[in-house]
Image: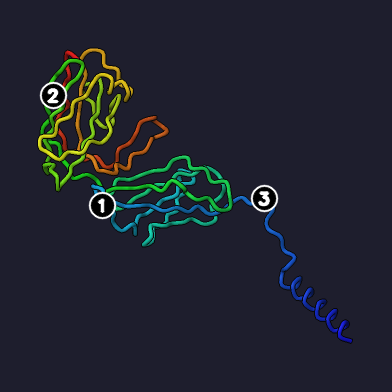
């Protein structure tokens, strides 16, 4: 009698499971999934600030955009995104726009594992640039506003070109970021160093300096092959020529 009761209960349980959809199977060939990520935010120096409120725009096509905002932990996500290649744009007031281009999304859950560290736009203005020639080298002497000192570091980036109209958009090479703790700031460049950055000067060439942020938000533009520098301060002086190098 007890055995028949167990069999009856088992039958009822199986009937309940099937009635409630227990026989459903996952979609065999999924075509969409989630994209998730996070950011670290900073001021124009190296001080961490709240990562909340950065807007991330997901571009699926030139005419289709979705947006998400970071929470108090800097996290964001997009749901039900068709598989394929997407672009992501990171925006926040006072921050230069950052981009992740041609991001591959091919699974039910695609994390952005390389967490961006993004900084505010630079407030450093270049007020003077002087070039002092040397032997197979030259020294750039740069004055900034605000002035750099040990308690108020400033950040500077240089651009090089044979074109006297060199700029952050028209360049043949660029330097890493240099930290200024004095005013004027001085930096000596050697021929070998320029060669390492992909610049091989033949005769006279030109140098231009810009105020930069510790985290520059730079990214590569696939359409031009150029590196974009969203956090540069556009207030600078004219390029200076290097001769006899």
Residue 55, image quadrant = bottom left
Q: Is residue 134 above or below residue 72?
A: above
Looking at the image, which residue is at 30% across and 24% down? 172
Of residues 31 and 152, the one drawn nearer to the viewer in this rendering: 152
Residue 164 in the image: state x and y as whole percent. Answer: 20, 22
Q: Decide: few, some or many residues near mark 2? Use Cα within 10 Å; few <14, some 14-19, many ≥20.
A: many
Q: Earlier in the sequence, mark 3 or mark 1?
A: 3
SS class of the residue under badge 3? loop
Left or right, 194 with reference to 147: right
> Would residue 97 appear left or right of 103 to someone viewing this image?
left
Identify the residue under disc 1: 47
In the picture of the structure, the residue carrying the numbered disc 2 is 131
> Against 223, is 84 above or below?
below
In which quadrant of the rendered view does residue 80 lie? bottom right
Residue 29, which numbered label?
Answer: 3
**Is residue 165 toward the left or the right of residue 149 in the image?**
right
């Amino acid at each position: 009698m007890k055995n028949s009761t167990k069999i009856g209960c088992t039958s009822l349980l199986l009937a309940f499971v099937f009635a409630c959809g227990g026989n459903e199977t996952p979609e065999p060939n999924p075509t969409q999934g989630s994209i998730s990520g996070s950011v670290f935010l900073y001021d124009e120096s190296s001080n961490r600030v709240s990562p909340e409120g950065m807007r991330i725009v997901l571009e699926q096509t030139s005419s289709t955009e979705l947006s998400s905002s970071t929470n108090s932990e800097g996290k964001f996500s997009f749901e039900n995104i068709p598989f394929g290649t997407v672009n992501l744009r990171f925006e926040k007031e006072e921050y230069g726009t950052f981009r992740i281009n041609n991001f591959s999304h091919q699974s039910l859950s695609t994390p952005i594992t390389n967490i961006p560290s993004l900084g505010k736009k630079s407030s450093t203005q270049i007020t003077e640039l002087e070039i002092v020639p040397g032997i197979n080298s030259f020294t750039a002497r740069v004055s900034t506003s605000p002035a750099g000192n040990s308690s108020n570091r400033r950040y500077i980036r240089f651009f090089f070109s044979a074109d006297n109209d060199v700029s952050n958009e028209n360049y043949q090479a660029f330097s890493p970021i240099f930290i200024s703790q004095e005013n004027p700031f001085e930096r000596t460049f050697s021929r070998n160093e320029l060669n390492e950055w992909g610049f091989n000067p033949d005769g006279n060439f030109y140098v231009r300096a810009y105020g930069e942020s510790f985290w520059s938000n730079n990214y590569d533009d696939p359409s031009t092959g150029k590196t974009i520098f969203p956090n540069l301060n556009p207030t600078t002086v004219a390029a200076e020529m290097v001769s006899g190098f």
